[in-house]
Amino acid sequence: MALLEGKKALITGIANDKSIAYGIAKAFKEEGADLCIAYANENLLKRVRSVAETLETDFLVKCDVTSDEDIRNLKEAIKERWGVLDIIIHSIAYAPKEEFKNAYLNTSREGFKIAMEVSVYSLTALVRELLPLMEGRNGSVLTLSYYGAEKVVPHYNVMGIAKAALESSVRYLAYDIAKFGHRINCISAGPIRTLAAFSITGFHLLMEHSIKVNPFGKPTTIEDVGDVAVFLCSEKARAITGEVIHVDYGYHIMGVFGKEEEIKKEVFEE
């Protein structure tokens, strides 16, 4: 039996077939889940509809997560179509492009507010509104973070602060929703070439650095993230909640940023 057979899953954050959310949705589909795809605005609908066809779902719902009305409408659409919900995938993050160009010190008040509302508060708002649909179903919630929440990544700026707040929100929500029998976790993924990633100045350098430094010398893929997401949202992970799981081929464990042979050459052959 597939790990997610019969599960009803809400997927947010798909922009195209390079999105992390798409990698998760694809893995979910392969494991038997039924999918509802929420998209932010009409400008994205054409692209999302094309992706939805490859996932064999026609259940698309507009949801701007800064709008309480849209979130309520999403809830009603799921209630009408399925009546219940098992999984929420929160793959939503945004800050104005200009906030990535200079130092974090120069973050604007408005840019900070936008980053926190869209990237952090939206998780709480979605979980709170959709919780009644998960009653009695041992539901699972999953969100996405990045190493910039833990350490300074130049030009990641306010998004690093937002991701740190998101990871903290996961822990507080884990405590709150456990009483209803539900779990929430977070995947901290290595750099992946998504549409959103190219808003970050010098992103290609982050990619190159992460591949050079991680013990496997491999880039993280949306398939890597999708497979871990399946596990975390399945009964196999029933005792795991409030965790941040790194899917980055070990990049985050490295204290000396270089391969053994390079370090030996620099230290011992000079």
Image (cartoon, rainbow, N blue to C red):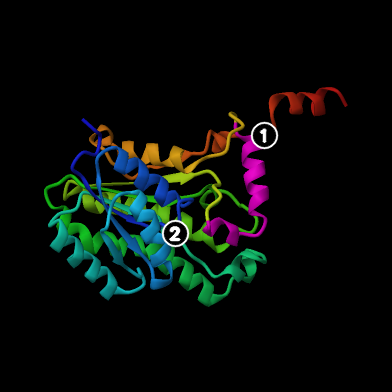
Residue highlighted by disc 2? 15
In the rendered structure, which segment of residues is drawn in magenta?
A: 195-214
Q: Position of residue 86 (x, y in %)?
A: 21, 49
Residue 228 in the image: x percent, y percent? Answer: 38, 37
Q: In screen coordinates, is 216 left or right of 140?
A: right
Which is nearer the N-term, disc 2 or disc 1? 2
Asked if residue 137 is positioned above or below residue 100 in the image, the reply reads above
Local SS, label 1: loop
The residue sitting at the right extreme is 270
Label number found at residue 256: 1
Within 10 Å of disc 2 (Cα), the crowding (few <14, some 14-19, many 20+) is many
263 w.r.t. 149: above or below:
above
Could you tell me which quadrant the N terminus lies in? top left
Secondary structure type for disc 2: loop
Image quadrant of residue 264?
Answer: top right
Query: Is 258 on the left or on the right of 12, as rendered?
Result: right
Residue at image x 47%, y 56%?
Answer: 163
Q: Quadrant of the C terminus?
A: top right
Is 6 placed left or right of 161 in the picture? left
Q: CA distance from mark 2 to mark 1?
A: 35 Å
- Amino acid bearing label 2: Ala
